Amino acid sequence: MWSSLLLGALNGEPVAGMALIPPHRLGSRELESEAKVDGETASDSESRVEAVTQPTSADDTPEVLNRALSNLSSRWKNWWVRGILTLAMIAFFFIIIYLGPMVLMMIVMCVQIKCFHEIITIGYNVYHSYDLPWFRTLSWYFLLCVNYFFYGETVTDYFFTLVQREEPLRILSKYHRFISFTLYLTGFCMFVLSLVKKHYRLQFYMFGWTHVTLLIVVTQSHLVIHNLFEGMIWFIVPISCVICNDIMAYMFGFFFGRTPLIKLSPKKTWEGFIGGCFATVVFGLLLSYVMSGYRCFVCPVEYNNDTNSFTVDCEPSDLFRLQEYNIPGVIQSLIGWKTVRMYPFQIHSIALSTFASLIGPFGGFFASGFKRAFKIKDFANTIPGHGGIMDRFDCQYLMATFVNVYIASFIRGPNPSKLVQQFLTLRPDQQLHIFNTLRSHLMDKGMLTAATEDE
């Protein structure tokens, strides 16, 4: 009997005839003995709890807007501030698209670094009282290591002939993974050497914090760049669908919202969620139709060795050629059309926009739960009325992963140009062996005859 009571008490379960004593009712000795675990004292635990509560950020709205909107209520003032700055961000988005793929890749890198900084800063501020040794230095070092690995893989994959042409790049490419592992191992050893008695548990918390942040931010931004290389349309349409869903959900919720959607985000409503979904699907179809007609958007981004620059010129694939589709009989009776001409990519855009409007918001809900866990309103105050960069890209990272998986599963096929590039780097005897194997294969299939070979 006594053993069961003791086990129940240790597990935190209420036991009949016995009340659990809350921590604040314990005496000083009991509290000190309970809190002194793994070198942590009661004062350490209290300081950690106090550090979690973050002060509410001050109003960071530009003074010009504050004066212009001073006569409006806080609800409408926030609406105008968000609207004006949203239009400014959309204009900036158009500018970087106009500047081309290289600028887009640089912007993705900058966004990645800023998002990492915001998340790491939250961890640093939450546990600031511990003054952990090397925490920030090691966090940025691991960011450098992971970026070196991912971008090195990208350079080797998409700039293969350039890498093979330059001797230093060829050596770095050959031993890239070994160098990446050595760099990470150095950081790992530095972390072990930085462990300090009394802070062991917290230091491992922060080690995990850094690595989860790297997984969420760096890996996803790497996938964004891979999507970009498949064609700018695979970069612009998904991002635009997320932006459209965010704007339209806010608009529908602002004017028609009555029913709360989820407790993590009390301001989100079912009306905004459903309205944003329909608006995003329509927007995706229209945007895809417009962009599918331009080669600069649909052609893969490739590196031209002759001009040492990126090119986006190609013969569009069937995915971006107008085709005629039969309309189901039920819809025919409503609209009076039997067929419709559209690009096959528009069908794929329905899948992209549906994901952006139904699943994409869960990235925002995840971020809301994270912020609530640490009692903060926004990740930062970089953009007035919107919060930090991470507040604007919480759904984009989830979308980037889906697009990359979607392309790999339903779109991408073997790339002949990459196969030829790799073939040309082989030794002559290896090239001859592949040539003979390919010739025998084509002759067996009847695509190449002996007469053709003699000619």
Image (cartoon, rainbow, N blue to C red):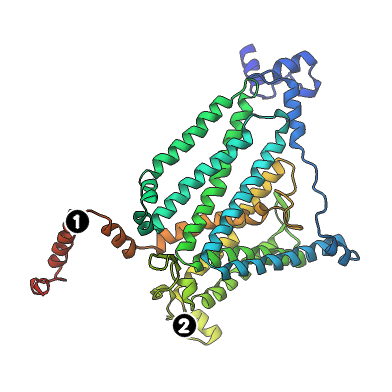
Q: Residue 203, position in %: x, y?
A: 61, 29
Q: Amino acid at mark 2?
A: Arg
Q: Which residue is at a point 34% across and 54% down the rendered structure image?
A: 164
User: Foreground: 70 or 49?
Assistant: 70
Residue 77 in view here = yes
Q: Which residue is at a point 61% across and 46% down the rendered structure image?
A: 116
Residue 65 location, quadrant? bottom right
Residue at the bottom extreme?
Answer: 336
Q: Is residue 161 above or below residue 295?
A: above
Residue 26 location, quadrant? top right
Q: Is residue 188 above or below residue 161?
A: above
Residue at numbered disc 1: 428
User: Foreground: 10 or 321?
Assistant: 321
Residue at the front extreme?
Answer: 167
Q: Residue 108, position in %: x, y?
A: 57, 57
Which quadrant is the C terminus positioned in? bottom left
Residue 1 in view here = no
Which mark's residue is nearer the viewer, 2 or 1?
1
Q: Is residue 183 above or below residue 43?
A: below
Assess whether mark 1 and mark 2 are in contact (beta carbons under 8 angstroms). Answer: no
Q: Amino acid at mark 1?
A: Pro
Q: Residue 248, position in %: x, y?
A: 68, 67
Residue 227 appears left or right of 446:
right
Q: Residue 410, position in %: x, y?
A: 41, 63
The numbered mark, 2 or 1, whose residue comes first in the sequence reads 2
